[in-house]
Image (cartoon, rainbow, N blue to C red):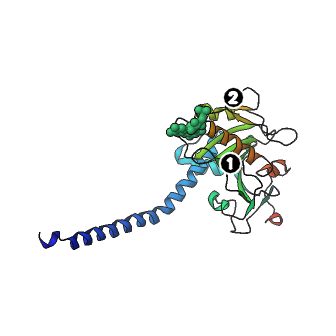
Amino acid sequence: MSNRDSVKNTFLVTGLLCIVCSVLVSGAAVGLKEKQDTNKELDLKKNILNVCGIPYEAEQVEQVFTDRISVRLINLNDGIAVTSTPESDQTSSGFALNKLTANEKTELFSDPAGIGGARENYAVVYLYPEKNQIILPIRGKGLWSTLWGFISLSDDDFTTRGITFFQHGETPGLGGEVDSAFFKDQFVAPKQTIGDDGQVILNVTKSGAAGPNDIDGLAGATITTQGVDKLIKFWLGENGFGNYLQSEDRFAEASPSASN
Ligand SMILES: Cc1cc2nc3c(=O)[nH]c(=O)nc-3n(C[C@H](O)[C@H](O)[C@H](O)COP(=O)(O)O)c2cc1C
């Protein structure tokens, strides 16, 4: 065996290769981070335009979004718009949904949506003034994953205008059918979400859309269906955006005095 093929050299070459590869991979991860964040933000904007039914060309997303959509930062505990959060000085101009969820939280007595036992104190909501729509971020546990999405409601009567899930890990063809036109189109047709007593009355159900407030669930995906039902009830309810939806000033800008 020549010296080149010695055990020592083999380990040396393997070790060097590992170091070079890890430097390349981490360098790429760090170098591309900004681009990834930009793309993530662009994807959120596309989802918000989609849930509003606003058409756009791929290269015009930023422009269409800025022209048509307003953004508000809401204190979920009282439903009032604020200019920034006290903990990390987040503002409504950022799309940092993940950072907002890292904000100070309120513990939940019960956690039907499966969001980890606590709900962040601030959230970003989106407004589509031309059509009087409110777009709320929603999330909750399905079978395998947390589903992240947006629901759009009419500001006039809180009937549905659309739903979209921009991130989830449910099985394609089963729970993954939350992305299907069959499922999503049912939310485009106006359905009552909130009853006269303020309770959430929209049901996502496996027993067929029998009633006027029912959304037909997903075949072979009872658990994802139940997850979507629970997460909608949670986020539209008193522990989610309930206070905001009951507030008279839903479309108002935050006044600096209301901050924090
Ligand atoms: C490989 C595999 C993937 C599955 N993925 C999902 C899923 O994404 N969502 C879901 O609710 N159920 C999923 N299920 C089915 C559940 O295990 C469970 O049987 C189902 O929710 C019951 O729904 P059904 O009464 O409509 O059949 C999956 C099952 C298998 C074997």
Residue furthest to the right in view is 197
- Left or right, 124 with respect to 195, comes to left
Name the quadrant where ligand 1 sits.
Answer: top right
What's the residue at 64%, 47% (across, down)? 141
Decide: is 82 above or below 162. below
Q: Quadrant of residue 120?
A: bottom right
Secondary element under disc 2, as helix, strand or loop, is loop
Q: Mark 1 against mark 2, which lies toward the viewer?
A: 2
Mark 1 vs ligand 1: CB below 8 Å: no
What's the residue at 70%, 68% (across, down)? 89
Quadrant where the N terminus is found in the figure: bottom left
Residue furthest to the left in view is 1
Quadrant where the C terminus is found in the figure: bottom right
Quickly name the residue at label 1: 138
Which numbered disc, 1 or 2, marks the residue that appears first in the sequence?
1
Q: Amino acid at mark 1?
A: Ile
Q: Position of residue 198 (x, y in %)?
A: 85, 43
Quickly name the residue at label 2: 207
